[in-house]
Amino acid sequence: MPADGPHRQTVDLGARSYDILIGAGLLSEAGQRIAEIAKSKRVAVVTDANVAPHYLAPLQRSLEAADFTVQSIVLPPGESTKCFAELERLCGTLLDGGLERGSLIVALGGGVIGDLVGFAAAILLRGIDYVQIPTTLLAQVDSSVGGKTAIDMPQGKNLVGAFHQPRLVLADSDTLNSLPERELKAGYAEVVKYGLIDRPGFFEWLCENGPAVLAGDPEARRHAIAVSCLAKAEIVARDERESGARALLNLGHTFAHGLEAEAGFDGTLLHGEAVALGKVLAFQLSCDKGLCPPADLDRLLNHYDSVGLPQSLADLGLADLDLLRILAHMAQDKKVKDGRLTFILARGIGEAFITQDVSEDEVLAVLAARRGSAPLAGRRVEA
Ligand code: NAD
Ligand code: GLY
């Protein structure tokens, strides 16, 4: 992969195809890049209060240099912003600002801003264009790509939303330099996901290069983001609306949503941290069911060790959570079908598959096995 110029990955969806550009310094080129796809010269930029001090002014400058009239909106940071009240406020502010059918909204931030802005764009004036400028690792490798948009409900995460593809994704790897380490690691778990699903070679590469990705090595970062976006783009192109293969991208998510709902959405547990542990739980469950060699769970745990990702509820400070309540939250997941939970399990690293053949007792056993600290790799530990 060349070191100069952005890497381009197309998400192939016919008339709704779009490009993901990945590279350093893309923020300063945003105006000219967006000018190539915008239908009018009115742009609204939506961001959060953590991201704004770093990146709002340079983005505004770049857009104004390309002759755009810019409305900027700064929302509170955090998962609680993905709610009806903020959605309503955002829609009102955008309409008051003169939003038109040809206007375009730019989501500048992590997955929270991307999901909320994408949903607002899906429903405002029955659907307008938006561009994703993801500024977290999680958003650059996952949430900004594929058009899933949503807000959370008291009943669970992402329960109200729409599929609405962006027109362009600009992943400026420089923006990751200001990201707190905890957020970086949470996003890294989604990078590992693509290796675990069907790219065992990429998993091997991450075992070698994961620490460099986290430490900020530019080429390692760019490669990790590019392969992740390629992997996601391929799956989305095959199954945009998750009637089949796209569900594989939910590896670890059924567990994660239960953990997040029980921990509360107050920042105690980050989405990416829950997903990181969810992947361990999915591999543990696969081993417990005799589907996956314990050696592959060991390889996953060894990699988690080397990059400092969580392997148990205790590692996340959640050893006291009520396992039955976690199970009850999991049962409210939108992936429940005919009353049965959908899980992504694995026959090994790079061999994930979708199944509903998992009992509540098996789920409880695996949660109990991974409740305490320092569980033995690849083996069931009694709670
Ligand atoms: P986030 O958007 O809350 O960002 C994490 C934190 O980092 C926030 O405090 C934010 O203000 C801050 N931040 C963002 N960029 C920064 C930067 N460059 N420098 C300094 N601080 C920065 O969280 P996230 O992890 O990016 O996204 C999580 C959300 O994404 C969840 O709501 C999840 O449901 C959603 N998600 C959606 C999809 C999808 O396909 N749509 C996929 C995965 C996750
Ligand atoms: N993050 C899961 C998906 O986009 O389908």
Image: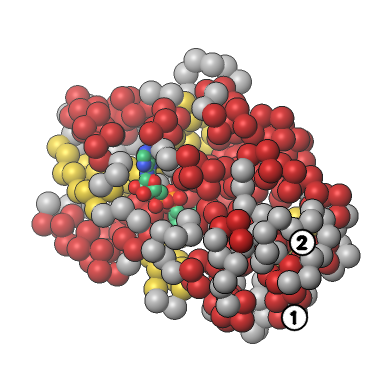
Q: Which residue lies at the image location 58% right of the left edge and 77% below the top edge?
A: 322
Q: Where does the C terminus fall, quadrant-wise?
A: bottom right
Residue 284's label in the rendered image is 2
Q: Secondary structure at mark 2?
A: helix
Q: Is residue 353 left or right of residue 97?
A: right
Residue type at the position of mark 2:
Gln
In the orientation shown, which residue stands out farthest toward the bottom?
Answer: 339
Provide the residue designation for mark 1: 361
User: Residue 184: x percent and y percent?
Assistant: 49, 41
Badge 2 density bin: few <14, some 14–19, many ≥20, Cα 10 Å: many
Residue 24's label in the rendered image is none
Q: Is residue 365 left or right of residue 17?
A: right
203 or 40, which lies in front?
A: 203
Q: Is the residue marked 1 within 8 Å of ligand 2, measured from its CB?
A: no
User: Residue 244: x percent and y percent?
Assistant: 66, 62
Marks 1/2: CA distance? 14 Å
Q: Earlier in the sequence, mark 1 or mark 2?
A: 2
- Vertical placement of 306 versus 374: above or below? above
User: Residue 192: x percent and y percent?
Assistant: 65, 44
Question: What scheme was used to colour the molecule?
Answer: secondary structure
- Whether residue 218 can be seen here: yes
- Whether residue 122 can be seen here: no
Q: Secondary structure at mark 1?
A: helix
- Vertical placement of 276 versus 329: above or below? above
Q: Which residue lies at the image location 84% right of the left edge and 68% below the top edge?
A: 289
Q: Which residue lies at the image location 68% right of the left edge and 64% below the top edge?
A: 372
